[in-house]
Image: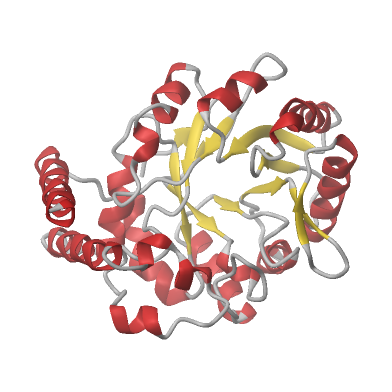
Amino acid sequence: MTKKRLGNSDMDLTPIGVGAWAIGGGGTPFSWGPQDDAQSIAAIQAALDHGVNWIDTAAIYGMGHSEEVVARALQGRSQRPYIFSKCSLVWNDQREISRSLKADSIKRECENSLRRLGVDAIDLYQVHWPDPEPDIEEGWKAVAQLQKEGKVRWIGVSNFKVAHMERCRPIAPITSDQPPYSAVSPEVEEEILPYCLKHNIGVIVYSPMKSGLLTGKMSKERVASLPPDDFRRKALNYQEPHLSRNLELAERLKEIGARHGRSAGEVAIAWTLRHPAVTAAIVGVRSPDQVTGVIGAMEFRLSEAEIQEIAEFRKGLLAKTAG
């Protein structure tokens, strides 16, 4: 297994990291429905036992619950993985969510995340969204100050466009960007990935399996039975005609994986890792069984012929949908 250096940091990351979005539980506008904390903890520990060396979470995932679950999963482990978290999405006592890039808000968020995670410093602290846009510079100055104070080791952004990163770079170096990237949603290939590659900004992509669509285990029946508070019920790619097209792509990925004894999900992850700008991929796991289905992506890589096969298949799907 080959690790890859994340941007200007001193961190060499395994090809995949544990994504802790879903384990935050239900009850928020972008939750994955209720979760079993014991299973989430077992999943994190299984991934770490397989050699995964980083975890990506955020304060807003479960309104602090994801960070608490991560802390519980790490109790008693002799070797701690890198821990990444995020700021800018906040909530009040009524659990109403808002966005803030004000310096005092970010400082308060960081202190709360440190407490929940039970660490002295967060290895990578990311601005979750560039919103409100007028406050981007203030927010970036705030996380840069946290880095100077030693409360966070490296600082990055998430969901930032090139124009947003251009506003940040003169203030302080950007260690990484975290964009969505998958064979379903490859849009960041146009500008964001080339920009990051040019400026030595690491890239840790999220949703490489498009929130479960490309695992090879999703079906129309399963989509119909998702919990009421699972955000995917309303997601565009889970609606027709996109859903049928995406499930067809998943079937082709499953066929490619079968040639190597790999899952469709592992093929989907490998597809993102093929891009030279991508440092590593965030892979959400909620049970040890899910870890078993994706851990092969630590080493599996697609051949040039298979990359071309996927490109041609995607082109055909898009043409069929357009027609």
For the residue pair 77 and 163, the one nearer the viewer reads as 163
Which residue shows up at 85% across the image and 62% down it? 92
Residue 232: % across, % down: 47, 69
The mark total stands at 0
The residue sitting at 11% across, 50% down in the picture is 316
Residue 262, horizontal then vertical, whole percent? 22, 62
Q: On the rendered structure, is 122 left or right of 234?
A: right
Q: Nearer the viewer, residue 34 or 226?
A: 226
Q: Is residue 31 left or right of residue 238?
A: right
Residue 47 vertical position relative to residue 307 in the rendered view, above or below: below
Residue 231 position within the rendered picture, expressed as x and y whole percent measured from the top left: 53, 69
Side of 4 where 248 appears, left or right: left
Quadrant in the picture for residue 266:
bottom left
Residue 263 falls in which quadrant of the image? bottom left
**Quadrant location of the N terminus?**
top left
Q: Residue at x 69, y 47 (%)?
A: 86
* x then y, percent, for residue 287: 49, 75
